[in-house]
């Protein structure tokens, strides 16, 4: 058989949508002179088990495995570092093969639930003042293959399949919208990873038109909005993207999302002592989101060296929650902090392990 592989740019298999994969895999199998049923064998290996290399795909002929290894990329990310917390939280640090950018993912076990927190960017351009990711700079968007690779590699390394996925790692998902949508298609396609859309949450600081488009493309995917302050001037300071997309415009899009999908949203609120945790701040928040079907999730700030904020005491978080609850009919919860001993907050591990640190 003539060698047609020379000069061919390898294809990242995890980048392909369902139909694209079938076509690409069928061509590869035919090139190798193998019967068509090998396509389904490759599909199951890729999406159900995802080994470290093509050579590990037992049951496929060695000649086919060697051919696949020449024309395809199985894992676009290199596993760089892993840390395990006393509470079972596992944090993974990856390196991009093409330019060495650092990416984080987190596995959070909680009873019968296993949640993966997945990144969509290397670093983050939004630069929220309380988030470690923004302090590490921005290297660029992740491809859909790099997003999916986090999921399949965590599953392989941990032997804990996800019950829930949250796009809440490094980066702003709605600023990498095309690859977000492509990765959601691959995640939910029953021929591929087959994860239920209702078990997936996209967390954003708010881009109105993208929120509307997401609700149209994936109405079953849940939405979480990082709000952090109801006062416009304070939110401008904490979340600089608020200058371009003011909270009122974002909340209009959220209301449309709820009306179109029939789903509640989650408002995420990081508590910064002395900054956004006063009774006045609580009253402003409840007034701002009143009428939107939602729950409010309060998160204690997780300190890191570069940030000018301190860790809130539990009693002050409870007092803030109670101030909200007096005027808010929905659920208001305090999220239990996970993985503090392994720099569990977004961006902390990559910031600590960056080449400059």
Image: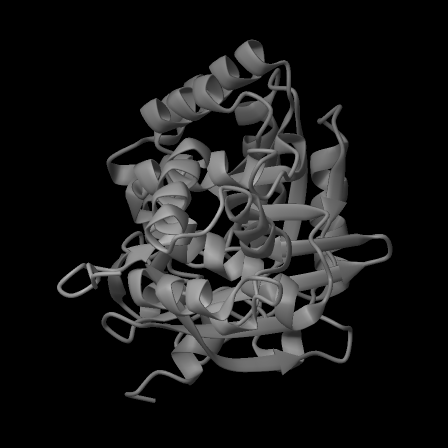
Judge from the rendering whether residue 237 lies leftward or rightward of residue 89; answer left or right.
left
Q: Residue furthest left?
A: 7
Residue 280 in sight in this render: no
From the viewer's side, name the closer residue of 78 and 321.
Answer: 78
Q: Residue furthest top?
A: 259
Instruction: Residue 321 in the image: state x and y as whole percent.
Output: 73, 44
The answer to which quarter of the image holds residue 296 is top right
From the viewer's side, name the closer residue of 250 and 28.
Answer: 28
The answer to which quarter of the image holds residue 170 is bottom left
Judge from the rendering whether residue 285 lies leftward or rightward of residue 241; answer left or right.
right
Instruction: Residue 220 in the image: state x and y as whole percent.
Output: 60, 24
**Quadrant of the drawing holding the N terminus:** bottom left
Residue at x-position 18% and y-position 59%? 8
The answer to which quarter of the image holds residue 127 is bottom left
Judge from the rendering whether residue 161 lies leftward or rightward of residue 73; answer left or right.
right
Instruction: Residue 326 in the image: state x and y as whole percent.
Output: 77, 31
Relative height, residue 34 to residue 198 (above, below): below
Residue at x-position 28% and y-position 76%? 100
Instruction: Residue 20 in the image: state x and y as whole percent.
Output: 37, 36
Number of numbered discs visible in the structure rendering: 0
Residue at x-position 31% and y-position 67%? 70
Relative height, residue 50 to residue 291 (above, below): below
Residue 299 in sight in this render: yes
Q: Residue furthest right?
A: 111
From the viewer's side, name the closer residue of 284 and 108.
Answer: 108
């Amino acid at each position: 058989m003539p060698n047609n592989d020379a000069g061919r740019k390898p294809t990242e298999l995890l980048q392909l949508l369902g139909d694209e994969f079938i076509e690409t895999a069928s061509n590869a199998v035919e090139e190798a002179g193998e019967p068509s049923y090998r396509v389904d064998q490759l599909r199951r290996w890729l999406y159900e088990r995802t080994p470290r290399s093509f050579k590990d795909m037992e049951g496929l002929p060695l000649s086919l495995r060697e051919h696949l290894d020449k024309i395809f990329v199985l894992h676009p990310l290199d596993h760089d570092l892993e840390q395990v917390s006393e509470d079972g939280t596992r944090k993974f640090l990856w390196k991009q093969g093409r330019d060495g950018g650092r990416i984080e993912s987190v596995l959070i076990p909680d009873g019968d639930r296993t949640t993966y927190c997945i990144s969509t960017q290397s670093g983050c351009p939004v630069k929220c003042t309380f988030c470690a990711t923004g302090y590490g700079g921005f290297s660029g968007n992740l491809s859909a293959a790099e997003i999916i690779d986090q999921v399949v590699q965590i599953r392989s390394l941990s032997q804990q399949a996800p019950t829930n996925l949250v796009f809440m790692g490094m980066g702003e998902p709605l600023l990498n919208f095309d690859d977000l949508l492509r990765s959601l298609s691959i995640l939910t396609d029953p021929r591929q990873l087959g994860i239920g859309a209702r078990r997936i949450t996209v967390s954003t600081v708010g881009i109105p038109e993208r929120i509307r488009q997401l609700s149209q493309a994936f109405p079953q995917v849940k939405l979480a909005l990082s709000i952090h302050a109801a006062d416009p001037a304070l939110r401008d300071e904490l979340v600089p993207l608020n200058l371009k997309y003011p909270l009122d415009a974002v909340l209009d899009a959220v209301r449309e999302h709820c009306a179109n999908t029939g789903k509640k949203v989650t408002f995420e609120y990081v508590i910064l002592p002395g900054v956004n945790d006063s009774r006045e701040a609580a009253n402003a928040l409840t007034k701002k989101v009143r009428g939107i079907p939602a729950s409010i999730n309060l998160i204690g700030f997780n300190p890191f060296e570069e940030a000018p904020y301190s860790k809130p005491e539990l009693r002050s978080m409870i007092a803030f929650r109670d101030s909200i609850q007096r005027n808010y009919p929905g659920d208001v919860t305090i999220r239990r902090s996970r993985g503090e001993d392994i720099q569990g907050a977004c961006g902390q591990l990559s910031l600590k392990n960056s080449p400059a640190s």
